[in-house]
Image (cartoon, rainbow, N blue to C red):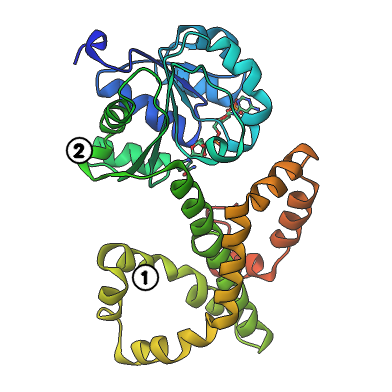
Amino acid sequence: MSPGASPLGRVVVLGYGNQGEAHARNLRDGGEQVSVAARPGRTAERRALAHGFTVAAPAKALRNADTLAVLLPDEVVPEMWPELASAAGATRAFVFAHGFNLLYGSLAFPADAAVVLVSPTGPGRVIRELYERGEGVPAYLAVHQAGRADAWALAAHYATALGSARARLLRTTVREETEVDLFGEQAVLCGGMNALVSAAYGTLVREGYTPEIAYLECVHQLHFLAELLHARGVAGLRRGISGTALYGDLTRGPRVVNETSRAAMREMLAEIRSGAFAREWLAEVAAGKPELTRLLEQADADPIEAGRRRALGDENPA
Ligand SMILES: NC(=O)c1ccc[n+]([C@@H]2O[C@H](COP(=O)([O-])OP(=O)(O)OC[C@H]3O[C@@H](n4cnc5c(N)ncnc54)[C@H](OP(=O)(O)O)[C@@H]3O)[C@@H](O)[C@H]2O)c1
């Protein structure tokens, strides 16, 4: 496809991190005309230059964007937006990879610009690796503002260039993507999983079991089960484990995740839906993240980290 024929025109990828690098490289390999906006003298700029991109500071790069992919950390966008939006005055399309700032951020866009969500369901490393193998990760598409373009077609074109049409494109809304994404990471993928392995490990070690064995059993092996879950689903996983494990799963699992846990999940979801979680997080960012820093220090001191070092040595330090 020639760049002139693409509905995206000149694409500027703002932020060359987890998502930005994969988006920029996949789109370029798909025939799009891509450049990168990054802060001078930092890692993102160095990496983008090493990958052969034309790189400029945001204030300059955004002036040349027909399509701007906003791939900065969500929490830095609201404060930077007035400056970014004025630099991107001629931009016809804005692409976001998560709806957080579209739902909560009060960002202003030119009325005739298309503002879309193309949210791949995986980290950038996987998006790039699968793309290079001729595969892709599924992506959610949503239209925040139609503008003058065919915004759905534009989002689908971007997602296809990213490689996601090789897997699946799912239409949704900004609200659904944002609320489900936040809930998933809080209840399962990050919050729930980390709290669960830490509690299980602590239970064993407090009862006198060997830390490295507790670690290998409650944390390290999760990888293999997660792979099975990914490949075969819950019912398939249950048919891939021993009878003893299956009996323990079905009779003891509901004791760990019980009505109290489900009530906590409903409460977390309500905080997401009311915007209370987003307000709390953005206030924490504005205050310089004191609570996040304190909680991370506390979490890093959890005995599970010592268990990991004992079980695995210092491979893959945090
Ligand atoms: N991570 C995921 O797996 C994932 C999955 C789906 C969607 N998303 C979404 O993708 C978007 C990007 O997330 P990400 O995880 O890719 O971000 P990221 O890797 O944390 O950061 C992207 C880049 O932003 C730059 N940056 C950080 N603070 C900045 C600032 N104040 N001003 C200018 N540049 C700054 C950093 O480069 P320098 O510090 O080197 O300048 C960094 O490389 C978000 O909307 C996120 O929700 C992420």
Q: Is residue 134 above or below residue 277?
A: above
The answer to the question of whether label 1 and label 2 lie on touching residues, with beta carbons closer than 8 A, is no
Where residue 242 is drawn, which disc sits there?
A: none
The percent position of residue 61, horizontal first and vertical second, equals 51, 10
* Residue drawn where x is 34% and y is 40% of the image: 127
Q: Secondary structure at mark 1?
A: helix
Label 2 packing within 10 angstroms: few (<14), some (14-19), many (20+): few
Q: Earlier in the sequence, mark 1 or mark 2?
A: 2
Compared with 72, 164 (above or below) is below
Tag of residue 134:
2
164 sits to left or right of 204: left
Q: Is mark 1 within 8 Å of ligand 1?
A: no
Mark 1, residues whose alpha carbon is within 10 Å: few (<14), some, or many (≥20)?
Answer: some
Image coordinates for residue 312, horizontal then vertical, percent: 53, 64
Residue 113: x and y in percent read 44, 18
**SS label for mark 2:** loop
Q: Between residues 193 and 206, which one lies in front from this camera angle?
A: 193
Q: Is residue 70 left or right of residue 77?
A: left
Q: Quadrant of ligand 1?
A: top right
Check disc 1 and give the amino acid type: Leu
Q: Nearer the viewer, residue 222 or 59?
A: 59
Q: Residue at x 69, y 27 (%)?
A: 79
Is 168 situated above or below 146? below
Seen at 21% across and 11% down, the residue is: 2
User: From the viewer's perspective, is 61 left or right of 279?
Assistant: left
Q: Which mark is residue 225?
A: 1
Total marks placed: 2
Q: Amino acid at mark 2?
A: Gly
